[in-house]
Image (tube, rainbow, N blue to C red):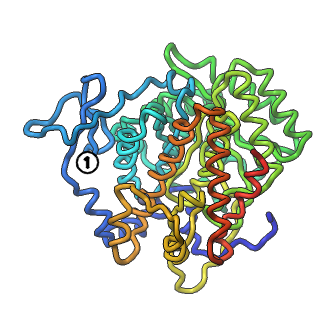
Amino acid sequence: MAHEEPEPMPEDDLDWLGDEDSLTQAVDEEQLQDEAANAWLAAEEAYVPLDDGNGYLAVGGTDAGSIVSALPAGSSPVGKTTAPVVISRDDALRGDRPVYLVHRGARHANLLPIVMGDLHHKKGRSLTVGAVVSLPSAKASKNASFFDQASVAAMRIADPQCYRLDDKILRLPRNPIGKRALEYAPYLSCAEESDWLRQVMDAQRAVGANLLLTPGRALNPDDPQNSLDTAFQEADQFLALTERGERVALNLTIPSRWLAVGALRNRLLDEILDQDQFDVLYVRIQWAQTKAFAPTEDADLLMGIRRLANLCQDEGRSLLLPQTGITGWFALAHGATGYGLGVSGSEQCFAEYAFRRGRPGQQQAQRYFEKQMLHTIDSSSHDVVQLVPGYLGCDCLYCPSLFDAQPWSHPLAALHHIFSMGALTARVQEDSARGGRHAAVRRIVAAAKRWSSGLPPLGSGDVPRHLAVWDQAL
Ligand SMILES: [Zn+2]
């Protein structure tokens, strides 16, 4: 699988590092032309009261996704529902509800708070919304205002992405630290300086993070012990710099071999077990991917993720799996506390970089997430699948406009994806009374496998091949 030729596509369709400067112009143009998405941004202000009567959640208008203490003059709450109170970071980390981390990437970032607020309103009793920004990808002021607006997020993470320094260990695009990244994240130029850790920490504090990450340099599978020792030493020093009330997650970046190969996996898990000063883990796993938005089918890697999640659950640690998309959702079955996803292909999976040849004139793929298949497919396949008896249409707010829009609205398809995955995450919790989250995931996967086996032939990339492997791994 890892050796298949990657599917051809325009390079920027994957948006490897999520840096704004590489995409801004194209995305601005896309959005200007996207009337359907613009209508969402121009929607009227709408507010619903919080359960405890202390404040309101904005579910439309320029404040969407924010909790405000009082209604602006002249507005009144809409509908009859209320929204849950946003829980504290520490309650969120306890993991009574799965944590759903939304990554702010370069695409359609201004639309994300809308869907985050919508999710909190409708599903916030069964999931906790969190927000992740990338420090090297955007100006600090933009990241800070994203946190401000998306104040439904109980957890705010400003990822320092120091793994960009490790292009000898990871497979990264050429020049992973561009001029802009250095400007936005100057600590990336001075990892040798004595106060480097403080710089990495201060950059996160400055934008308003409430869960601080250790630098997260990549662990080298060819030099396992040294690299584990270095990472944990650095993390201990980082921990020593925190102040009262601050909380740290151990940030690990690992090539998938660390989880897929038994000997390396045992070494990593033993180390985690020993180092119990870290009760929150933020683990980014790089694996080879042949098709954007397709989850991993690598049974060894899935077993590794399972062991890691089991260990964390047994030891009362919170495991967060950033940038994993639906593979992270699967890990909820085994004890992961939460996972992250975003709009771009790179936010569904921290994929090994591979040069992808675009075909001349190739357009960005029109993707649609099918919740009954647990898979993202081409819109042409969606047209086929939706005619199959038993198909359940999506009831999110965005789909009616998406299917009315001509041409295809990439931002609305993204909002649908993020909402539906959130709803699926909430469902794991809602359905956990019988057999816990493991049984809930198993039932959802089994139903998806059954449903998908009766579909007419689809393009090879649109067949949900992962379901058989997942079914086995549950
Ligand atoms: Zn939808």
**In which quadrant will I find the N terminus?**
bottom right
Check disc 1: other Cα within 10 Å, few if <14, some if 14-19, many if 20+.
many
Location of ligand 1 given as a quarter of the image: bottom left
Q: Where's the C terminus, which quadrant?
A: top right
Query: Which residue occupies 32% across, 34% down?
Result: 83
| 306 relative to 34 in the view: left or right | right
Q: Which amino acid, mark 1?
A: Gly
In-front residue for pair 166/390: 390
User: From the viewer's perspective, is 7 left or right of 138?
Assistant: right
Q: Is residue 22 something that shows in the picture?
A: yes
* Image spot of residue 27 (x, y percent): 41, 66
Tell me which residue sits at (34%, 49%) in the image: 114
The image shows residue 111 at horizontal and vertical percentages of: 36, 54
Tell whether 217 sits left or right of 365.
right
> In this view, which residue lies farthest toward the left?
74
Q: Position of residue 48 (x, y in %)?
A: 24, 37
Q: In this view of the protein, which residue sits in the foreground, 255 or 196?
A: 255
**In the picture shown, does residue 308 fall above or below 297?**
above
Given residues 397 and 26, the one toward you in this image is 397
Q: Secondary structure at mark 1?
A: strand
Q: Which residue is mark 1?
A: 60
- Give x and y (percent) for residue 154: 44, 31
Mark 1 beta carbon near ligand 1 (under 8 Å): no
At 72% from the left and 35% from the top, the residue drawn is 309
Residue reaching furthest to the front: 389
Q: Is residue 391 above or below residue 81?
A: below
- Viewer-closest of 433 and 165: 433
Residue 374 in the image: above or below residue 70: below
